[in-house]
Image (cartoon, rainbow, N blue to C red):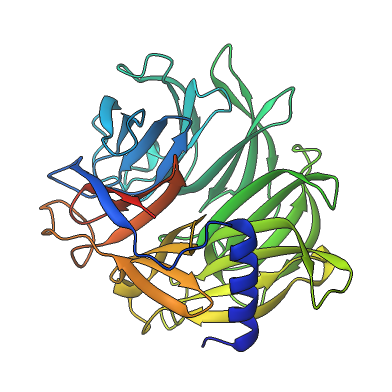
Amino acid sequence: MRTPKALAILTLCLCLAAPAFSASVPKRTGSMQLSKEGGLGRLEIHGDTAAVLQRDEGIVTLLSLKDPDRPKVLGRYDDGASQSLDGDIAFSSDGDFIFYARQTVQFSKDGVLVLDISDPSAPALAGYAPGGGALRIASYNDGTDEWVVLLDAVTGLAVYRFEPTTAQLIPVYADPMPATEKVGGPSSAGVFIDPMDEEQGVPLLYVSTGGSGLQLFDFSDPTSPALLGENADEGIAEIEVLSDLVVSKNGGPAIPMRLVFAATEYWFDKTNVPAIAIYDATDPTKIEIVGRIGLGPARDETRAQGMTIGPGGLYVANSSLGLVRLTGKGPKTVFKESGRLNPSAKVLTAPYAFDVEYANGRLYVTDAATGTLSVLKP
């Protein structure tokens, strides 16, 4: 359902966030097949270095983006863990470490791996925090300490303090509520940290799960996140946030806005229609869904996986549609990978767009079927 209010908000806010608004179709300027066995998963970028998860093989690949159109492999971390699943990755603030939330069918291999990448040609395991079903991860530096936030299928929301001299993750907080019916498998969780929200004057932590919807926390004290508000109308997964927008309607007074774009989840409810729900979180105590933009019929092959905001709108990596751009005119596929399903890729169809990030004036898209990383210029 593309509600008029949703489209109006989307057009207005994405134009504000991306002044170089353009209706042109992104052009592919680079491509490389990182895996011929499995598929690619989550992607993170820190400066001119990217980390890509070869999700079916449990391999973290480091890439140089000094030439943004021609990524170059710097090194790989591979400890031979078998039957890897989704997982997630995040850089430390100084770029010397990667926090790898690993999910496998070997429970003893699950948890958070701390990889020392100070020598990117030889990533090495430096620390480990056990867990079960580690799914989403993010990091935050408050100027004194580095904090790591994990969404885990067993623990739920967990926070660690990172000690860089020993590369250890020290647990400081765990969600007191059982997580079994909140964070499950693919497309059931998301996490976003705003280091400083100008309106609230504090860092904010956004958490989404398939079982509890959207929650917004004051993250001033990471050892005790304070819940500011929530909306549990529906389960959601991947999220992207536009915060600290100042909007003036019809020449009236400037109004701050805080919007959250969220992909509907499908781990707990397979009948959920694939869509991007738009939440107005301007008042954290009254978070409401103000619109929804559909992405196709309810089946696993048409799900939103990763999202990013870039020139021209909100970009969504949709498993079967490819890279979709959402603007005031609705969803439009702007890129679709070609290629066949790799022999060990654990997805249903090929191609299968999995994640997208915008950096260095480029969109980087991973494919979970073909093992290909594509570079697009908006």
What percent of the width, then of the height, locates residue 237? 52, 63
Q: In this view, does 139 lie above or below 226?
A: above
Query: Is 273 placed left or right of 367 in the picture?
Result: right
Is 359 positioned to the left or the right of 354 in the image?
Answer: right
Q: Residue at x 12, y 58 (%)?
A: 339
Residue at the top extreme, as displayed: 165
231 w.r.t. 17: above or below:
below
For image coordinates 74% across by 38% down, the residue present is 222
Give the residue at x 81% y 48%.
Answer: 198
Residue 267 seen anywhere in this rendered image of the structure: no
Q: Nearer the viewer, residue 115 or 378?
A: 378
Q: Position of residue 327 (x, y in %)?
A: 50, 72
Residue 169 placement, left or right of 290: left
- Depth check: give the residue in front, 151 or 93: 93
Relative vertical location of residue 46 with respect to residue 347 in this rendering, above or below: above
Q: How many labels does the image show?
A: 0
**Frontmost residue, 262 versus 19:** 19
Point 75% across, 71% down: residue: 287
Whether residue 317 is visible: yes
Where is residue 252 shown, x and y percent of the image? Answer: 87, 74
Q: Quadrant of the C terminus?
A: bottom left
Q: Residue 80 location in percent, x, y?
A: 23, 31
